[in-house]
Amino acid sequence: MEKIFASLITIGDELLIGQTIDTNSAWIAQQLNNIGVWVKRRVAVGDNKKDIIQALEEESRDAHIILITGGLGPTADDITKPVLNDYFGGRLIVHEETLHSVMAFFESRGLPVLQRNVDQARVPDTCQVLFNRRGTAPGMLFRKHDKLYVSMPGVPHEMKGIMEDYVLNIIKEEFHTPALLHQTLLTSGMGESFVAERIKKFEEALPASIKLAYLPNFGLLKLRLTAMGKDKISTAALLSEHFHELKSILEDIIVVDEDIPIEQVIGRLLKAAGKTMGTAESCTGGNIAHMITSVAGSSAYFKGSVVSYANEIKTSVLSVPESILQQYGAVSEETVKAMVAGGIKTLGSDYMVAVSGILGPDGGTEEKPVGTVWMAAGDSKDVVTIKHHFRYDRARNTDMASVAAINLLRKFITR
Amino acid sequence: MEKIFASLITIGDELLIGQTIDTNSAWIAQQLNNIGVWVKRRVAVGDNKKDIIQALEEESRDAHIILITGGLGPTADDITKPVLNDYFGGRLIVHEETLHSVMAFFESRGLPVLQRNVDQARVPDTCQVLFNRRGTAPGMLFRKHDKLYVSMPGVPHEMKGIMEDYVLNIIKEEFHTPALLHQTLLTSGMGESFVAERIKKFEEALPASIKLAYLPNFGLLKLRLTAMGKDKISTAALLSEHFHELKSILEDIIVVDEDIPIEQVIGRLLKAAGKTMGTAESCTGGNIAHMITSVAGSSAYFKGSVVSYANEIKTSVLSVPESILQQYGAVSEETVKAMVAGGIKTLGSDYMVAVSGILGPDGGTEEKPVGTVWMAAGDSKDVVTIKHHFRYDRARNTDMASVAAINLLRKFITR
């Protein structure tokens, strides 16, 4: 059984000066992994002919499949197409279908078609065109010395479309990929090194074909087992056996035994129980609601949210008594409890989660330093609270607080 | 003037299977860029000795500085430290300061210190330790053939701490970096190729030392000029001259002439005017509020938000008349107008932005297909509306709708 290797090349100065975060590579890697292709390396280079050619040469050394994204726009800084044309030795010809599509795109918007837009329809005659239904830059497939090269635009939804419409199917047809399977456990309440200690014997006894990875995840911990084998059935059976053993060792700290985020875990719980939730947020500023509603179908169980950033909203919309705010302050156990009660009244949901804290960089006091966050979760009868101290920057503190709040509600519901 | 090149190596299987999105590289690239260091390549490899060593060798070919992140955790899959120890030829010794810090970390939490935690304090005797104040894995600096190698943990805030505490200063001291300056223009309302057409002559006449990049940004367009030169003063003057010319050509579509996001633009406008805002969100589910509150100090102008995901909340909390919802539906111009009026009443802010739409993947109808989003922005006297059709997936549609809504409010305020 030969392992099939892929290498990803991302082209664009914007990646090298840090103006853009590369989310394409992670998505592509996931998709390749699902079909048993192992990504060996990922390389990012600038819009520079010499660097692009060097990357093409180096990455084709160990990889069977080279996927290239970026550098295909209509502007002068995008040079990937002429470089590929040179590298694979051809000449640029017009691709009729793309030309029609470019014309139609601009006409439907009542805009004139510019020369630089028409040029998007030129492709090397050495490539197989992978038609881009979502944009003007076509995908291009080249072959050289038994290797497969695919060039795609860097715009995420255009790249994803070309991958799903063509590339993944072509790879599945042309390569005999091994079975590569993952099972993931999400845990809560125990640090990485303590989990590692508890599963030490299990880890040492794993067969060579199964790998274990620890993936800290905003205060939770993901454990992933990866198995590789000749066929899917026997690989799945071997993986399942070890995954069950892992689950039994960690039974008390399991959140979910699938690779889904906590916002999806809570959604399933609510859906199964036919219950609804809402959020009453101060410092997290709507991020918990955003996470919950990022799940398709969340309208079945999510009623809504009150973001009470200003204190008077806590009073006017969430009915937090003025006296509580004055006596205990906005960042207090009493306030988040009152936010839960008031939120349930205002939004009419079965469950409510409330958060109030100081996420930084400023606003801390001696008594309540930056990172102090009170949270509460409950229903109309009962409520639980917890105080956290987050030690990161504003953005990360927001994410950690949001995950912790959803996890608190999960624990309340499953208590 | 010699250009100083850096190369970034990211180590970890989680990056190659796509379980983690690499945000570290973008941050590091920005920091290096600020001090005049050019990132030539970025490479990601797995937790595999051969691949790590190959990356070290290849990346030191063209780069003066090699920054390595990841693979330093306490668990068995992390092998970066022993590999570096072998590569730079040394033996592992105990670093006292790190050992004390590890002990104190666990003691303060009432947890026992495990062997694997103590092992975090072992470092190659060939390295200079860069003490990690935020975690247990120390940074390590190696030198070989006039090249600088720095290994840092992959946890973002730990890596950032080590970069800011040591690495950036060391680089500034040891390398004579050229001046590398950027100026960025954010525009709205004109597509990439039409902007390119309008500034064609300007672009062609740019001196070789200035580069122009087009960076589409959730429906807006960023244009970035980068200038490189011997000294900061003359480079800044040359860049400024061309940036002013660019601004004058694009005057009618400029959002802001700095590299700041739209949520910061709106914050400045509100602060300057001494006004407040709030959001009334349906399909965006709190994401606009989250974006606004991601800006430190936003409590000065952000009152809060009502996320009315369920229709009854639109009625009960935002006072949208039942009759409007019945006659026009939740996704309609009339509803978002009523949400603005109701939001101002409920939250007491000067301005309000409201959004209602269908972001997918399901929920579309013939008349209102997936991607249809109505938005309104206004104050107690006046309101403007716009209808959008977004063509992407749920997550991207959410981001595009949020940026468009904030931009609509910006236009309303500056009209």
Image (tube, coloured by chain):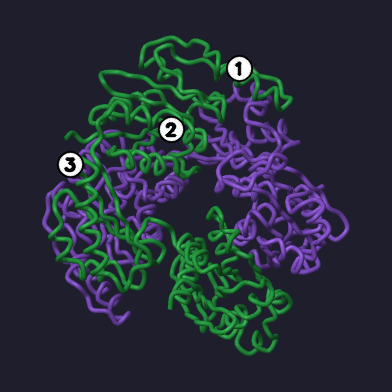
Chain colours: A green, B purple
Are circles 1 and 3 on residues that touch, CB within 8 Å?
A: no
Residue at disc 3, secondary structure:
helix
For label 2, the crowd category at 10 Å Cα-Cα, with few meaning under 14, some 14 to 19 and many 20 or more, is many
Nearer the observer, B223 or A311: A311
Please provide percent x and percent y for residue B198. 69, 25
Task: Check disc 1 and give the amino acid type.
Answer: His
Q: Which mark is residue A163?
A: 2
Whether callout 3 and callout 2 share a subunit is answered no
Q: Which mark is residue A100?
A: 1
Nearer the observer, A331 or A174: A174
Please identify the quadrant where the N terminus of chain B is shown. top left
Front of the two marks 3 and 2:
2
Residue at disc 1, secondary structure:
helix
Residue B378 visible in this rendered orientation of the protein: no
Please provide percent x and percent y for residue A263. 49, 61
Residue B311 sits in quarter: bottom right
Q: Which residue is mark 3?
A: B50
Q: Chain of mark 2?
A: A
Q: Which mark is residue A215?
A: none
Q: Residue at x 21, y 40 (%)?
A: A231
Left or right: where A244 falls relative to B365: left
Residue A354 visible in this rendered orientation of the protein: yes
Left or right: where A269 falls relative to A354: left
Residue B292 sits in quarter: bottom right
**How much space separates mark 3 and mark 2, taking CA atoms?**
30 Å
Relative to A218, does residue A49 appear above or below in the rendering? Answer: above
**How much space separates mark 2 and mark 1, taking CA atoms?**
22 Å
Residue at disc 2, secondary structure:
helix
Relative to A325, does residue A66 appear above or below in the rendering? Answer: above
Left or right: where B380 falls relative to B158: right
Q: Residue at x 83, y 53 (%)?
A: B383
